[in-house]
Image (tube, helix red, strand yellow):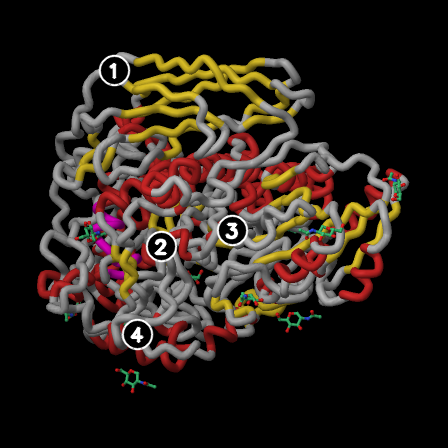
Amino acid sequence: MALASTFLSLYIFLFAYIFTGFACADPDSLYQRQDDGLLTSPPDYPSPWADPEANGWEQAYAQARDFVSQLTLLEKVNLTTGVGWMSERCVGNTGSIPRLGLRGLCLQDGPLGMRFTDYNSAFPAGVVAGATWSRHLWHDRGRMMGEEQYGKGSDVLLGPASGPIGRAPTGGRNWEGFSVDPYHSGVAMAQVVRGIQGAGVIATAKHFVANEQEHFRQAPEAVGYGFNITESLSSNLDDKTLHELYAWPFQDAVRAGVGSIMCSYNQINNSYGCQNSKLLNGILKDEYGFQGFVMSDWQAQHAGAASAAAGLDMSMPGDTVFNTGYSFWGGNLTLGVINGTVPEWRIDDMALRIMAAFFKVGRTVGGQPDINFSSWTRETLGYIHPMAQENLERVNFQVDVRGNHANHIRESAAKGSVILKNNGVLPLSSPKFVVVIGEDAGGNPAGPNGCPDRNCDNGTLAMAWGSGTAQFPYLVTPDQALQRQALEDGTRYESILANNQWTAVQNILREPNTTTIVFADADSGEGFIDVDGNRGDRRNLTLWKDGDALIKNVSSLTSNVIVVLHTVGPVLLTEWYDNPNITAIVWAGVPGQESGNSLTDILYGRRSPGRSPFTWGRTRESYGADLLYEPNNGEGAPQQDFSEGVFIDYRHFDRETAADPENTPIYEFGYGLSWSTFEYSNLQVAKRNVRPYQPTTGNTISAPVFGAPVDPDLSQYTFPPGIRYIYRFIYPYLNTSSSGEDASGDPEYGQEADQFLPPGAIDGSPQPRHPAGGQPGGNPQLWDVLYTVTATITNTGDRMTDEVPQLYISHGGDGEPVRVLRGFDRIERIAPGESVQFRADLTRHDLSNWDVVSQNWVITDDEKTVWVGSSSRNLPLAAPLR
Ligand SMILES: *[C@@H]1O[C@H](CO)[C@@H](O)[C@H](O)[C@H]1NC(C)=O
Ligand SMILES: *[C@@H]1O[C@H](CO)[C@@H](O)[C@H](O)[C@H]1NC(C)=O
Ligand SMILES: *[C@@H]1O[C@H](CO)[C@@H](O)[C@H](O)[C@H]1NC(C)=O
Ligand SMILES: *[C@@H]1O[C@H](CO)[C@@H](O)[C@H](O)[C@H]1NC(C)=O
Ligand SMILES: *[C@@H]1O[C@H](CO)[C@@H](O)[C@H](O)[C@H]1NC(C)=O
Ligand SMILES: *[C@@H]1O[C@H](CO)[C@@H](O)[C@H](O)[C@H]1NC(C)=O
Ligand SMILES: *[C@@H]1O[C@H](CO)[C@@H](O)[C@H](O)[C@H]1NC(C)=O
Ligand SMILES: *[C@@H]1O[C@H](CO)[C@@H](O)[C@H](O)[C@H]1NC(C)=O
Ligand SMILES: *[C@@H]1O[C@H](CO)[C@@H](O)[C@H](O)[C@H]1NC(C)=O
Ligand SMILES: *[C@@H]1O[C@H](CO)[C@@H](O)[C@H](O)[C@H]1NC(C)=O
């Protein structure tokens, strides 16, 4: 296991790190004690308990209440704590409740397919799905991924992602999400969540929040690559930016009923993501009304009772650090509850939230299907407890869960390809002689899965690297699919699948009648892997493997060059995009298993292309925001100030152009050519009558407790006789029955709660409801439709194709973006001469700004404008919103 060994090498350091760092149990006092001017995060307690009347959760809550009421403390703790890294077959496994027939929950990566198994599908990356701008494809994506996990026995799918959102284009994991725009990402998140959960699997919206770079995301990992820092990076951002940009898609996921949210590795305002009470208690659970459970990213938990008080509900993978055999929770949490350090209502709420999510997606206790794969071997036999190497038996049943998903994958990757330039060469039609050039068109010599977690960039790029990967069931390379097409058409075909065969290239390009297709790529991934000096994040925005030189050389020799780019995000096209010999540029993204077929469908015009989910700038600097590659706070947490506020990607470029009209990107957000031309006309804005916005008032119920009161007799909680102890396994039991501290080995537990937990943390009395809250997704009136906007779109060309009308608004006022996306649709198969209606509803949320004083959404008095058009810069229709 590449992943395991990477972490094992950090183990020694981590061990010391956790135990010295742990004395500061209170996440808020940690920074409040700082007098060095670093940003802090305000305390927000108590942790909100689930609401029996939350929309869409009523039945799940009742089922969960009935179930949790039967549980003992040890059983409740078992639900909240993973059994340890590689202790069982999934990447995350909770404890079980054998007495009632609940097996431990199986949690499995990831956002583009099911990781660490076989006979699964490899979908296009999120950024390609995003580029389709298609709600129904997003829903199908979720449903199919849910079906695949369901069929292997997984209960929780660790996706979709919208964090990182893509603050800087070099961010290593940007491709896992859908786009750099929060509105677009939010719609996609909600659709994928509905799809996954409709298939009976809990979805996980991740990573909450501001997890915008890989460098320094975990201090121990950074030590492993040579930086001596003691705390992880802090993303420092203001409340308005949080609400209007980074947290926005999560609000949509909560409204869609997402069962789980994963908190992130990084700190936010110098408080760790998995113990930041302002974010977990204040924003997710109180303001957004999130009713499911918050799980930690793997090793992102840094405290025991303090993280429970701050709103964490599930510890993953359960051990403090991979394979220590110790846990911040497990027995520690059991003792914490017995001693009153953690209120009983808090452990009950954790268990209730986990089980409510479980019932919400239709799962039943006793009805869970068996897990029929193991993450840790592809062989048939394996250990049920791989870390302990115990129970060798059949673990892999090679169940084929792919169904007919290949059709969707092929369609989605085609419809998510973006045609950036086309001088009329596309679509191809039985060309005389196709010459394909570039390593990126062919296979990896080691096979499609030859590099673990895709930790190389060999052959065509169809998946980037890290935990957000899946094994390819096969990979159709561009070379294979283009050659098959050529054979069908009687086209002559030659491919040179290397970037350094210069003599051969020169010779072939002397021949007449060539249609040359040049391939190049740029990769990135997760920070535990370094590929060619790219520690997760990209170190530059240029093409890899001398791709730019290849394109420039080829286009200097011949006059019909189509450039195909497989990249995780924008690359700099500046030096060659306007060469007239380059007749077309196609961004094919990170397309998954059907790569070549999808590409061929686009190049030959069988499918309609997508629209760019990010801006293509002229220089790296032109993006404004960038990542932090060197620590800037000595050995303390590197400080990443999001001082650009909401001005990332197109909002930044639009502001630059407003100041200097010459300052433009090459291709803007939302841009993409199609097979036809469209005329936009007849913009209509209909104002709806809705009642004025009422902040939510009133109080919650008091914190409920479920089942029998906790028995203070410690002897009840020790390791039961007759169970075999599994090496390094995390259990809910106490070490001894002697005293609090000895029983857990943790000085934190056993102290009086009010000695170190923040004020209010143990208060279970009714709490005022958040004015912007009230229901999952926030105050229900945020979703009132204030305007309905329509426009007519006419196909004025001669080919049937899809169009992606986009609606932008300006909020008006100083310091606001020129415009922001607030509506879109992908209208399919519009015939030549046909007119269709584009329609979009604008909600109160869409028109509001976050007001930091009233802590609510407010529609300002500033004049607002609506635009409709085909990209963020091609907006022929405009009207005031009055
Ligand atoms: C971070 O600090 C800024 C500036 O004080 C504040 O506006 C924001 O609410 C804080 N956010 C969190 C999550 O603590
Ligand atoms: C907790 O979970 C473990 C692992 O599944 C199991 O062995 C143990 O029996 C469970 N404990 C209780 C009290 O249910
Ligand atoms: C997985 O396959 C095994 C063996 O065929 C079967 O017992 C189990 O029910 C299957 N699990 C699911 C989720 O279908
Ligand atoms: C790393 O930082 C720690 C804590 O300040 C210090 O004790 C140690 O000497 C440093 N190690 C290196 C290699 O600089
Ligand atoms: C409890 O947590 C502490 C770290 O805070 C750890 O040292 C100890 O081993 C844990 N106890 C158990 C039983 O996991
Ligand atoms: C594959 O990638 C690795 C790591 O990026 C590189 O060192 C190696 O040379 C590549 N192998 C081939 C055959 O291209
Ligand atoms: C092929 O090239 C020759 C020589 O330039 C030219 O006469 C002929 O028209 C070309 N054929 C096609 C189909 O482009
Ligand atoms: C950018 O990074 C890639 C991948 O590591 C590398 O191949 C390329 O040479 C770098 N470009 C420049 C200009 O250094
Ligand atoms: C375009 O290709 C022709 C050969 O067909 C070459 O002579 C010319 O220099 C190229 N132009 C550019 C701008 O590279
Ligand atoms: C924790 O609770 C147990 C059981 O009530 C008790 O024996 C022990 O002394 C307590 N520890 C502390 C430090 O209060």
Up the image or down, 742 lies above or below 825; here it is below
Mark positioned earlier in the residue sequence (2 or 3)? 3
Dot 4 falls on a residue whose secondary structure is helix
Q: Is residue 257 left or right of residue 756?
A: right
Q: Is mark 4 within 8 Å of ligand 5?
A: yes
Mark positioned earlier in the residue sequence (4 or 2)? 4
Q: Is residue 715 left or right of residue 839?
A: left
The residue to which callout 4 is attached is: 18
Residue 532, position as x, y percentages in the image: 56, 71
Mark positioned earlier in the residue sequence (3 or 1)? 3
Rounded to the nearest angstrom, the CA distance separating label 4 from label 3 is 38 Å
Rounded to the nearest angstrom, the CA distance separating label 1 from label 4 is 53 Å
**Residue at (65% x, 18% y) in the render:** 831
The residue to which callout 3 is attached is: 570
Amino acid at pointer 4: Ile
Mark in front: 4 vs 2: 2
Rounded to the nearest angstrom, the CA distance separating label 2 from label 3 is 14 Å
The residue to which callout 2 is attached is: 625
What is the span of residues highlighted in magenta in the rendered image?
Answer: 271-282
| Residue 274 lies in the magenta stretch | yes
**Residue at (66% x, 45% y) in the render:** 580
Mark positioned earlier in the residue sequence (2 or 1)? 2
Closest to the observer: 857 or 220?
A: 857
Mark in front: 3 vs 1: 3
Closest to the observer: 293 or 232?
A: 232
The residue to which callout 1 is attached is: 690
